[in-house]
Image: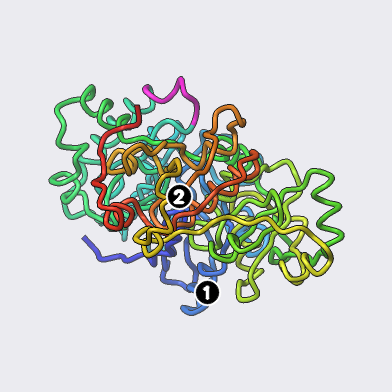
Amino acid sequence: MDAITPIPVVDEGLGNSSYLLDLGDGTALALDPERDLRTLRAEAAARGLRIAYAVETHLHADFISGVAELAAVEGAEVVAPQVGERAFRYTALEDGGRLDLGRLSLRALHTPGHSPEHLSYLVYAGEDLAGIFTGGSLMVGTAGRTDLVAPEQTIPLARDQYHSLQRLMELPDETPVWPTHGAGSFCSSGGGAERTTTIGRERRGNPLLQLDGEEAFVEALLAQMGTFPDYFRRLPEVNRRGPAVLAEPPALAPLTAEQVRALVADGAQVVDARPVAEFAAGHVPGAISIPFRKVFAVWLGWLADPDVPLVIVRGGDQDPEAIAAAAALVGVDRPAGELSGGMDAWTAAGGEAAHAGLADTAGLADASAEGVQEARIVDVRQASEYADGHVPGALNLELGALAGMDAGQLPGGPVVVMCAHGERAAGGASLLQRAGLADVTVFKGAPEDWAAATGQPLVTGPAR
């Protein structure tokens, strides 16, 4: 088996890997590229490669695809599953279809499950198998979730996923496996931190492949699926139609405080991308806190309303181009802009500033924090995280669900919001404030930190 090593371009925030494959003639193939192509293009340029092919395994739900831009800007040939009927020019492959790439070639395998049209691609060097791109089918230690298309398709697609993995297990043990989805991806149903694997390693160690038969597989796969962002239902159709090609890198237009005030009065949303402590110290009333970090795009897509203008508040040391690129990755192509001068400009123009409490373990150990310790705790982590260990009496309200809750579903009185580090807790606190809760505190730490500071052991098990 010839050694072929694709160059991974990992987006840790989305938990995905795109790949750049050197075709040996000055050109390259890009596999499952995201819309933010800066790193992929830099990898190609560093090697003197022109991206000639843009290949997709399926209609992506978690990000806007970059294939349309690679076709429009660089003349790349788009290759994708025949099923799915993309509304732009592409080369369609079906099961067994072959694409000649010179010294290399691809052969398509229909591996439905994560989506109905899903293809994996066997890579050949001559007649020798060199590896396989498995997209959202076989992953490291797991497989792609099957509930993203429609609720009524979840179980049928889980059965398809079982048979797709069985088909992949017919490959030789030494076959390298290059998945797209991986650790941190909401498209994954679990798995570990590694990004690539082999058929033999998965045959021996993937828990889903150790089960006895289809029924056990389906039950185990479904049990691993947590909630996912609402935009996952929307983006496959955007990618099928072909997303807008951005003529230039997305940017944040400067807005005065008066312009922001007028936009908010007309229904615009304010997203505060600053660190937690800065948000707590003072923010535009009604702003949603989504601190800018690797997972910013996921939470922006999950919490912000895609149908209203978006205004960003950022810190002076935060890169506006990076924020705009992350927004475009989940379909927010052109935010209304950013508050020029930040919160200093807002308050200088007479704007009111809202505040949130901020607590840490040092404060909890102090008798003066007794009120904080007695407040109702809202744990905004995923249900599986909550079940692994939470503060006694904590109410589990997942962050992704808070935006859709009305005041009658939310706790009253003083509230302390908790997650694993503090960033999601700040998001939860901001949504609770928007719903009308006045006494809201963000806990900067994890339940384990709370337990250590207060002497209260954590409780395991699901919410009751």
Q: Residues within 10 Å of mark 2 (few under 14, many from 20)?
A: few
Under circle 1, the secondary element is: helix
Residue wearing tag 1: 42
Residue found 61% across the figure and 64% down from its top? 281
Query: Is residue 127 one of those drawn in magenta?
Result: no
Q: Residues within 10 Å of mark 1 (few under 14, many from 20)?
A: few
Query: Is residue 150 one of those drawn in magenta?
Result: yes
Is residue 464 depicted above or below 17 in this figure?
A: above
Residue 16 visible within the image = yes
Spot occupied by residue 69 in the image (x, y as percentages of width and height): 64, 58
- What residue type is disc 1 on? Ala
Give residue 371's mark: 2
> In the image, is 438 to the left or to the right of 294?
right
Spot occupied by residue 340 in the image (x, y as percentages of width and height): 77, 69
Is residue 72 depicted above or below 265 in this figure?
A: below
Q: Earlier in the sequence, mark 1 or mark 2?
A: 1
**CA separation, marks 1 and 2?**
52 Å
- Span highlighted in magenta in the image: 149-155
Spot occupied by residue 121 in the image (x, y as percentages of width and height): 37, 48
Residue found 44% across the figure and 64% down from its top? 9
> In the image, is 382 to the left or to the right of 170?
right
